Image (tube, rainbow, N blue to C red):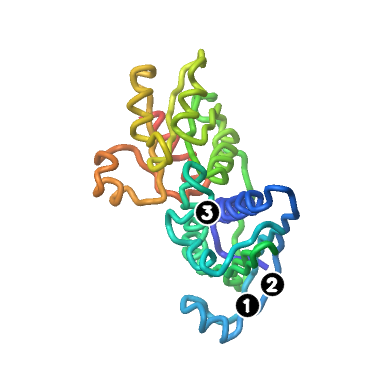
Amino acid sequence: SSVRADPGQIEQVTVNLAVNARDAMPTGGTLTIETRDVMLDESHAAEHPSVQPGPHVMLAVSDTGIGMDEATRRQIFEPFFSTKGPGKGTGLGLSTVYGIVAQSGGTVDVYSKVGRGSTFRIYLPRAEGTVETHPHVRMPAAPGGGEVVLLVEDEEGVRLLATRILESAGYTVLAAAGGEEALRLIEHLDQPVHLILTDVVMPGLSGRDLVRRLSPRYPGVKVLFTSGYTDNAIVHHGVLDEGVNFLSKPYSAPVLTRKVREVLHA
């Protein structure tokens, strides 16, 4: 069965959940990803006001890891809530998942027991009739090709996805999990950096401070900031100046590549 959703965003959801599942199994375990046609009844819809009863497609990601207690389960979709400790995540991964699913007209259920693993079930309304699909097409290289993009993103799932998107579009990607790692990465780099693509809010060195540190080394380098916040919220709180190049997360592959080209060739 088919659903109406952005393939890039659904891929981001799956990668985020898979990375979380891996982190929940520090000594190993089993990751299971499955899909199934399901029929949601009135009782399910009553628990989720945004859901209409009827045919849905379920995407489930399960692990056999450490699990979580009920208090944790109730908070996992809140922005900035994290159980990974300082410097190991922003707590935006699952809130991003929730946002994508809600934007696609779906809902998320979580089942977990301490020591028994977790299962995230995503329900998306089944599309009626014929749905136009767009097969994955390798994006052509940007004019000139091979521009170097320094990608700084602390959420591993987002970083892996963005790296794959940009490399498939013909860019050379240097990926770092934070500002300090980015500085170490380019310390002995003997090639230019054409674009800094960095999250704004990160543990340690922020995206804005990183750009300030790198600007003297790469005069005229282009910069594209990203965040789970909107640009209006970022500017309102004084985190960024108005008019900077900005891309809200979550983003799809076409949106990311189009924005990168736009910034590079402005």
Q: Nearer the viewer, mark 1 or mark 3?
A: 3
How far apart are the two marked residues, 2 and 3, measured between alpha carbons? 32 Å
In the image: residue 37, left or right of residue 206: right
For this view, does 209 lie left or right of residue 154? left
Q: Which residue is mark 3?
A: 83
Q: Which residue is mark 1?
A: 55
**Of 220 and 183, the residue lying toward us:** 183
Count of numbered labels shown in the rendering: 3
- Compute the Cα span from label 1 to label 2: 7 Å
Classify residue 125 by image quadrant: bottom right
Query: For mark 2, what is the residue?
Result: 37
Tell me what residue is drawn at x 47 percent, y 79 percent: 49
Residue at the image point whose x is 29% and y is 42% from the top: 239
Which label sits on residue 110? Answer: none
Within 10 Å of disc 3 (Cα), the crowding (few <14, some 14-19, many 20+) is: few
Residue type, label 2: Asp
For residue 67, above or below residue 157: below
Contact (Cβ within 8 Å) of mark 1 with mark 2? yes
Instruction: Please tell me whether mark 2 sits on a helix, a strand or a loop.
Output: strand
Q: Is residue 199 left or right of residue 55?
A: left
Quadrant that contains the C terminus: top left
Residue 6 or 233: which is nearer the viewer? 233
Is residue 184 positioned above or below 135 on the image?
A: above
Q: Position of residue 213 (x, y in %)?
A: 35, 24
Of label 1 and label 3, which has the lower sequence position? 1
**What amino acid is labelled 3 in the image?**
Thr
* Amino acid type of the residue that numbered disc 1 sits on in the rendered structure: Pro
Task: Find the distance from the CA under tag 1 to the CA under tag 3.
Answer: 34 Å
